[in-house]
Image: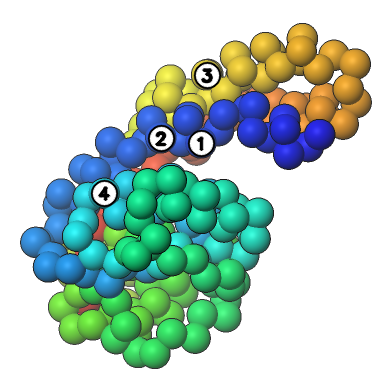
Amino acid sequence: MTTNINSELQKDLLRKRFNKHTKRAFQMLPELDNPKILDIGCGTGVPTMKLARLSTGHVIGLDISQPFLDELKRKVEKAGFSDRVKTVKCSLFEMDFPDESFDLIWAEGSIAVIGFELGLKEWRRLLKPRRLLVVHNGIDNLPKKLKQIPSCGYELIGDFAVTEDTWWCEYYEPLEKRIQELRVKYSDDPEALAVLDKEQREVEMFKRDPETYGSVFFVMQKG
């Protein structure tokens, strides 16, 4: 039942609302010819699929969750991208790709797991000379992060914020409405209700402290 309720929450559909920000960040990049792209912490692959559509290159979606990767594989097959999009099950703490493997590294949210500065330092070796890194991360400590970018060996091409109002209107408000709808449908299912309770707690956390939920896309080039 847990799988069904997670599917019915339609979080992928909500996440797709952010694809316009993914596209905006991608369009800030210099032109890339058939790039090799690594999407770190790809989840079910919403940005992965968008990157495949925006580029002519090959994309690796990397995540620790096999169920997420299985869902991405289904999307890849349905879209006819099996020759250009692959998945790798791996912790971002254990990536062992050879140095200078990629033209573009993409990370929407995942760098928070390892830390902004450490992620910039450790992922730099994976990029070819003068190639590109795009990170979507919280807006907290923004002046510090902007200083860490050059100190970690990158040039900032540009950045833009996704405000807390955007997060509410495009994600948390519709998520809350969907939770309320599913509570009625699954009123006699304790397992499903427990999943919905967990999702509602995240919504309540946002309501209590919305200003901390703003985020920033950083578009960088390896120096």
Q: Is residue 116 above or below residue 118?
A: above
Number of other residues with Cα within 10 Å of mark 4, as a class: few under 14, some 14 to 19, many 20 or more:
few
Distance between the alpha carbons at the discs numbered 4 and 2 = 13 Å
53 vs 202, nearest the viewer: 53
For the point 15% across and 58% down, the residue is 29
Number of other residues with Cα within 10 Å of mark 2, as a class: few under 14, some 14 to 19, many 20 or more:
some
Q: Secondary structure at mark 2?
A: helix
Q: Which residue is mark 3?
A: 174
Residue 34 horizontal/vertical position (percent): 17, 68
The amino acid sitting under disc 3 is Pro
Q: Which residue is mark 4?
A: 53
The amino acid sitting under disc 1 is Asp
Distance between the alpha carbons at the discs numbered 1 and 2 = 6 Å
Number of other residues with Cα within 10 Å of mark 1, as a class: few under 14, some 14 to 19, many 20 or more:
some
Q: Which residue is mark 2?
A: 16
Between marks 4 and 1 in the image, the one whose residue lies nearer the viewer: 4
Q: Is residue 200 above or below residue 33?
A: above
Between marks 3 and 1 in the image, the one whose residue lies nearer the viewer: 1
Q: Which residue is mark 1?
A: 12
Residue 23 horizontal/vertical position (percent): 24, 44
Distance between the alpha carbons at the discs numbered 3 and 4 = 26 Å
Distance between the alpha carbons at the discs numbered 3 and 1 = 12 Å
144 vs 198, nearest the viewer: 198
207 displayed left or right of 147: right
> Are discs 4 and 1 less than 8 Å apart at CB?
no
The amino acid sitting under disc 4 is Arg
> Are discs 4 and 2 less than 8 Å apart at CB?
no
> Are discs 1 and 2 less than 8 Å apart at CB?
yes
For the point 53% across and 18% down, the residue is 173
Q: Secondary structure at mark 3?
A: helix
Distance between the alpha carbons at the discs numbered 3 and 2 = 13 Å
